[in-house]
Image (spheres, helix red, strand yellow):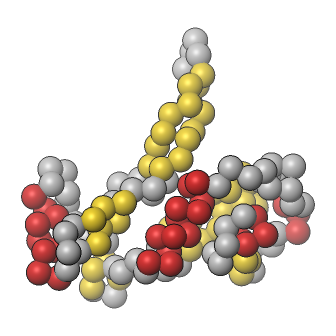
Amino acid sequence: MDIKAYSPTHVVLKQWKDRKKKVITPLLPKIVLVKTEEKLRDQVFQIPGTVKYLFEQRKPAIVREIEIKQLRAITENTRVIDHEVSLLVKGIEIDLTSYGFKGLKGIVDKVSNAVCWVKLDTLGCTLKLTIKS
């Protein structure tokens, strides 16, 4: 097995004084997901700018294959989502299948207008979802 890397991206609308432009940016800033054998782990540090592994309980964090598939589903989804945001309550676990993300679950961290932040504990990150009505 070689070293495989994946950095999910999304398009963000950036605004300057004179124009707006769509820019592709990382979904998980400063994080690249790496799949390799244990014996090849240290070769990752030969890539310039690589500083450290993400750790969980003093061991390198492991992202499961299903989570990679879920991230791909998020970044490749172009569906318009129609849902009443006021029904989302902080602290509840929601199944994001109805939003077009098959099999993805997370905990609602915050709801504000048409934006919902959903924590994905196994990845150690929070997704900011803008809900279109």
- Apparent side of residue 123 relative to residue 33 in the rendered image (left or right): right
Instruction: Give the residue at x 36% y 81%.
Output: 62
Quarter of the figure with the N terminus: bottom left
Residue 83 coordinates in the image, percent (x, y) = 87, 60
User: Which quadrant would residue 116 be assigned to in this image?
Assistant: bottom right
User: Which quadrant would residue 107 be assigned to in this image?
Assistant: bottom right
Instruction: Give the residue at x 68% y 50%.
Output: 78
Who is closer to the viewer here, 37 or 30? 37
- Apparent side of residue 27 relative to residue 52 in the rendered image (left or right): right
Instruction: Give the residue at x 50% y 75%.
Output: 67
Instruction: Give the residue at x 16% y 74%.
Output: 41
Who is closer to the viewer here, 54 or 105? 105
- Apparent side of residue 91 relative to residue 52 in the rendered image (left or right): right
Residue 110 appears in the figure: no
Residue 29 coordinates in the image, percent (x, y) = 41, 53
Residue 77 coordinates in the image, percent (x, y) = 65, 55
Q: How many marks?
A: 0
